[in-house]
Image (cartoon, rainbow, N blue to C red):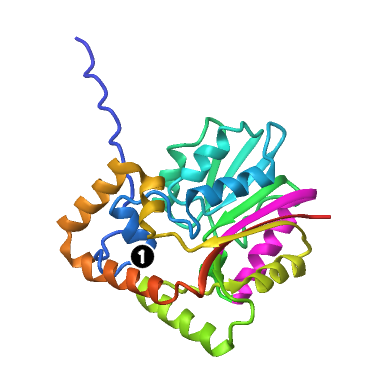
């Protein structure tokens, strides 16, 4: 008599961004991701790709990617065929999404970005996007220090972050913007000016190679269409209408971005470890 066939192991569901928190109350990047937005970088996908270009990633590189998010930049970067790739993610939901675009042999770990536990000088390129903006000052410094520790001499580091403008913005105005962004985004948002971003990397032991700034384009309509395509944009609108509780919050975020449009931008910096 034949033994009964073994039952296939159950497939674990992909963790949901934001878990069971109501869409109207979760951090904005989770809410936008749940509604279908795939690119959530301050300057849009094109600025991310210019950062990747400036880093000159190629087949000999061992790459560390801090907080790849939904993996859009990751896919473009992996198409360059780096020797190895390590993603450092903040949680299992984000990790599950980036693992879906990784190659066999690539690795994703869930750990704080300032404490990866990986060997010194184990990478030739490191980069992070929309990461340092969300960190308080001590964690900004610690994360940059971790990137420097992981990189070999001559290794390259890139960031794509939210920018405060102009450089001479008064401290009271900076504090007002930070409080307002934190309130509407439901997550700490602590952008810096260009001089402050430069100083953060230089104080961390890096030599600046290139800097490019642009507009804050997260919800800019032409950039939204370019990044997500018509299909993705219509899907986002459909999901938003299907969850009307998010509409007042989306409107509030849009209004805050417009209110501070002269003081918010995006910045990419590439640097190297001497």
Q: Residue 107 at what x, y percent from top left? A: 55, 40
**Horizontal and vertical percent for residue 179?**
44, 82
Task: Identify which residue is drawn at 53% across, 83% down.
Answer: 174
Residue 17 visible in this rendered orientation of the protein: no
Residue extending furthest bottom?
A: 172
Drawn side of residue 202 relative to residue 167, left or right: right
Q: Is residue 62 a member of the stretch shown in magenta? A: no
Q: Quadrant of the C terminus?
A: bottom right
Q: Which residues are magenta?
A: 137-161
Q: Residue at x 46, y 40 (%)?
A: 99
In-front residue for pair 17/117: 17
Frontmost residue, 224 versus 107:
224
Q: Quadrant of residue 10?
A: top left
Residue at horizontal 63 percent and vertical 82 percent from the top: 168
Give the image location of residue 252, x and y in percent.
Answer: 30, 73
Q: Position of residue 164 (x, y in %)?
A: 56, 73
Q: Looking at this view, is 188 or 241 the one in front?
A: 241
Query: In this image, 159 relative to 186: left or right?
Result: right
For label 1, the crowd category at 10 Å Cα-Cα, with few meaning under 14, some 14 to 19 and many 20 or more, is many
User: Quarter of the image containing the N terminus?
Assistant: top left
Q: What residue is shown at x 40% (from left), y 71% (from top)?
A: 257
Query: Residue 245: in sight, yes or no?
Result: yes
Front residue (pair 260, 185): 260
For the residue labelled by badge 1, is the local secondary structure a helix, a strand or a loop? helix
Q: Does 175 appear above or below 157?
A: below
Q: Which residue is mark 1?
A: 28
């Amino acid at each position: 008599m034949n033994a009964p066939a073994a039952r296939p192991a159950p497939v674990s569901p992909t963790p949901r961004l934001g878990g069971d928190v109501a869409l109207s109350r979760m951090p904005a990047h989770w809410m936008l991701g749940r509604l279908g937005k795939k690119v959530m970088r301050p300057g849009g996908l094109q600025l991310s790709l210019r950062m990747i270009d400036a880093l000159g990633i190629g087949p000999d590189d061992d790459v560390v990617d801090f907080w790849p998010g939904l993996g859009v930049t990751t896919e473009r970067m992996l198409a360059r065929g780096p020797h190895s790739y390590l993603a450092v993610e903040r949680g299992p939901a984000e990790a599950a999404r980036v693992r879906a675009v990784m190659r066999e042999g690539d690795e994703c770990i869930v750990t704080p970005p300032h404490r990866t536990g990986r060997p010194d000088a184990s990478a030739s390129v490191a980069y992070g996007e929309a990461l340092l903006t969300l960190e308080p000052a001590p964690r900004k410094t610690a994360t940059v220090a971790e990137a420097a520790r992981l990189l070999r001499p001559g290794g390259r580091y890139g960031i794509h972050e939210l920018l405060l403008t102009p450089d001479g913005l008064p401290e009271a105005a900076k504090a007002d913007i930070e409080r307002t962004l934190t309130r509407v985004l439901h997550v700490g948002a602590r952008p810096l000016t260009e001089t402050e971003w430069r100083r953060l990397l230089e104080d961390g032991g890096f030599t600046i190679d290139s800097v490019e700034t642009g507009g804050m384009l997260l919800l800019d309509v032409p950039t939204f269409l370019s990044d997500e395509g018509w299909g993705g944009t219509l899907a986002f609108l459909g999901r938003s209408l299907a969850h009307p509780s998010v509409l007042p919050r989306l409107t509030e975020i849009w209004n805050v971005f417009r209110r501070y449009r002269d003081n918010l931008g995006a910045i990419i910096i590439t640097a190297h470890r001497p």
